[in-house]
Image (cartoon, coloured by chain):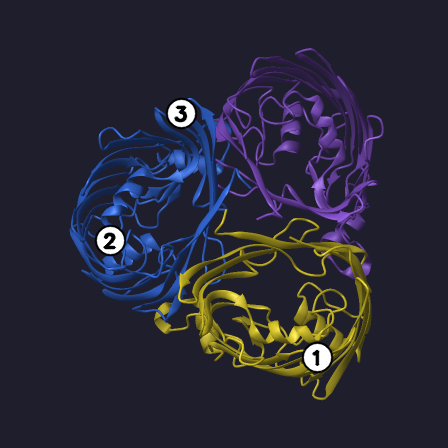
Chain colours: A purple, B yellow, C blue
Amino acid sequence: QSNVTVYGIVDTGFIKETGSDVSMGSNIDNRIGFKGSEDLGGGYKATFQLEKRFNLNDGTIKGVDWEGASNVGIAGPFGAVRLGRLNELPTETFRKLDPFNQFGVGSMLLGSQRSTRISDTVRYDSPNFSGFKFGASYSLGKNTDKDSRDNAGTQLKLADADNDGYAVSLNYSNGPLYAVANWSRLADSKDSSVWNLGAFYKFGPAKVSLGYEKTHDKGYKLGSAKALKESTQDNWILGLQYAIGAGRINASFSYMDIDHARDWNDSKDIKKYSLGYEYDLSKRTTLYAMVSYSDFEDEAVSSFYRKSKDSDTVATDDSITGVQIGITHKF
Amino acid sequence: QSNVTVYGIVDTGFIKETGSDVSMGSNIDNRIGFKGSEDLGGGYKATFQLEKRFNLNDGTIKGVDWEGASNVGIAGPFGAVRLGRLNELPTETFRKLDPFNQFGVGSMLLGSQRSTRISDTVRYDSPNFSGFKFGASYSLGKNTDKDSRDNAGTQLKLADADNDGYAVSLNYSNGPLYAVANWSRLADSKDSSVWNLGAFYKFGPAKVSLGYEKTHDKGYKLGSAKALKESTQDNWILGLQYAIGAGRINASFSYMDIDHARDWNDSKDIKKYSLGYEYDLSKRTTLYAMVSYSDFEDEAVSSFYRKSKDSDTVATDDSITGVQIGITHKF
Amino acid sequence: QSNVTVYGIVDTGFIKETGSDVSMGSNIDNRIGFKGSEDLGGGYKATFQLEKRFNLNDGTIKGVDWEGASNVGIAGPFGAVRLGRLNELPTETFRKLDPFNQFGVGSMLLGSQRSTRISDTVRYDSPNFSGFKFGASYSLGKNTDKDSRDNAGTQLKLADADNDGYAVSLNYSNGPLYAVANWSRLADSKDSSVWNLGAFYKFGPAKVSLGYEKTHDKGYKLGSAKALKESTQDNWILGLQYAIGAGRINASFSYMDIDHARDWNDSKDIKKYSLGYEYDLSKRTTLYAMVSYSDFEDEAVSSFYRKSKDSDTVATDDSITGVQIGITHKF
């Protein structure tokens, strides 16, 4: 059917982490999407994208129905404007500095205000100006007007956590160099904020990346109060990718420093070392294997970090080793 | 893939109504569908349709999984028979009299027994007889036999609200004239009923419509007991659509009179004035803007009307102004 | 879109069983799926399949989001390996002995450890060796390691019900003969097990089948504790299919003997007689009608059998007659 392209990724394999039995899980998020565009003439076009996310190992849905994307827009000489649910700019552009693209057990350490996608958003992407691209987004917070009599909104308002969301992003891509800087504030986050900057450079088969991200977490995120309150976080990622034939070796060191979280007033840190190998069986099918070691300064920071990432887990380990193998197929 | 057509509509924009902050929302319902047919020979064919509904602004599903349609059927010289979940005839045919097609803040006032789609239904649509078309549907109510030991069904039976549903529809379409008359009873509605009739006529660029609908609401609808009990309702719609180039001006006045609802024994009325403009960027992409003003006789009727429409809202305003802008893209 | 095939089945009609009013329901499960493959060269290919199940009559989803299939794999000269959610081998291969394919009111009696699909699984299918095919699968149980601190897993571990799942399957298909033997243990079933064997043979328009299945149910199934505890079950199916023109007559007798279930220490039996007719309107569209009579030895075994099949129903009838008509359309 000519107006719609059906596309997706299926990915699964096996994961073993300290403190858990072997389980099946994915590296790149599983998805199926429907997208298309219509030529409006004069260099303009209308676009749309709908994308579902799911767990391949058991067929369960992940997040909302169109977790991955749900938007309509207009693209033209001025750039592109999209409305709805879409990628958050700082995450979309910064994750490229991680050789593991923030997926799987090899993923860099992540700040607690990271969000891959945001709803109720208008996003603008500029055209390419001699390698420079600029982006900005505005997200509506939950309706907290008194007359709207919405209980969740009222709670947010009382906590002074009912802000709208904003992001600005600038990146430069030219030949071997990619550089990026972002600032963002998620909606309904009590004015929490994140900024980051970094770059990668390609030397023949090698790609070296370095990135830094600063997070001011005020204890709210996209309208949800977090069990663990305010903190400031510094995240560093140093990455190396090296291509050999149809494969790639990925290696990274990431470092995170967490200040003033919970009941500790000093700073505690986490170090993570990741090593992986990917092999392309074809243009659309890849096998992968990776291993990582996370070294938490103590159990308090381990629990804080893992709770902010995964509400089901209260980790008590002060180090975690993860191994993952699997297959990715794109269609 | 030749047996299936993927189609849909994506629509979002901004809505501001009295008593609520600005929010993102749609005009025409967002949907993606899969449909197809198979030639059986002799003028017969098998047909199917599956259609999902969702909110584009945040990617959440709307209603059941195939909220929009979920049916299989046979079409032929005799007309078409479909089984499953599909459009309710009176709503499908009567909403054409509203220039806003019962969508968005410009929508005409709606009776409390209105249902756009019904499940467990057999629907027949006649072929076109010199402009006349006839339709009928039969819907199974929830299983209320004592032996079925289904608690919801038992409650319906005790309340004498366990009727099957029926609808008949007749319309005439010839050149500039469209006229329609419907009668329906939703399943498990305690024998509530709706009938309506109306017509539109096209004079060059103008289309003028007039419709009337009578609702007898007994306090049940599709198996659910309503918080607000019995009432009778009279709904009027007077519509005007005027085409100018690639755009259309839409205007309507709708009037609703509600008798004997709740604890009031006289009748209370609502008046609604709507004005909008649509502009086609292309065959499949349209921009729209509209404004409406609803004048409720008092706060009691405001609360009754809005509760019957939207269970999340208890309105206390005796008038509501709504403004909406956005974009619709069909694929 | 060349990488994806969209396919499916829509099926609905009317069912009347003893103790229930007429309802709409399906014979073959309703589904829509997305599948594809990529040539990897050398006789190898990558494959994927995603398949949703739903109820056509009301548009509601059935099971998890990809209830029918959710897997990725590699096929080649060695056979095929798939990972994720897919058909359980013993059910997939044994149901062919039932003329009703274990669908609709005509379905053979089913053991309480039957599962059509399993998650977290690696499945291997051999190539065809002179008519012989071999298959095996391994399923991960829920994570029950102490350190995983998962409450459901902990309960399973305490009950000693946290086993991984396994299945092996062998079948022979050559001309008119099909023979099959299976052994399986579902994951997290407290080491419950099922084995079966059987065959069918085609004599011109007739196909005669005979199968036997033994179930040892220990009261757990795929991680869920069953209300009704341990039992052993013997299931027999004798089937006849007879082709006449574009139609087929289906007939079967199935017999089930249940030992030591609940509070009875002897064995109780069920007999079921089914008769049906299918008529192909075309290659993809079929009409069907069937009737069945189930004779339970007493109400205790009726309740046990139906509870194990359908948790919503506590049957008190010691015999059940079922009638079903409908239409199946494949796309």
Classed neighbour count for the residue bearing mark 1: other residues with Cα under 10 Å, few (<14), some (14–19), many (≥20): many
Report helix, strand or loop for mark 2: loop
Q: In the picture, residue A5 is in which quadrant?
A: top right
Chain ID of residue with mark 3 = C
- Three-letter residue code for mark 1: Phe
Find the distance from the CA under tag 1 to the CA under tag 2.
55 Å
Rendered position, C297 above or below A140: below
Give the residue pinned by disc 2.
C99
Quick one: C238 or A41, which is closer to the camera? A41
Provide residue C48's location: percent of width, then percent of height.
47, 36
Chain ID of residue with mark 2 = C
| Same chain letter for marks 2 and 3 | yes
Rendered position, C327 above or below A312: below
Find the distance from the CA under tag 1 to the CA under tag 3.
64 Å
| Same chain letter for marks 1 and 2 | no
User: Can you tell which of label 2 and label 3 is closer to the viewer?
Assistant: 3
In the picture, the disc for residue C43 is 3
Give the residue pinned by disc 1.
B200
For the N terminus of chain C, the quadrant is: top right
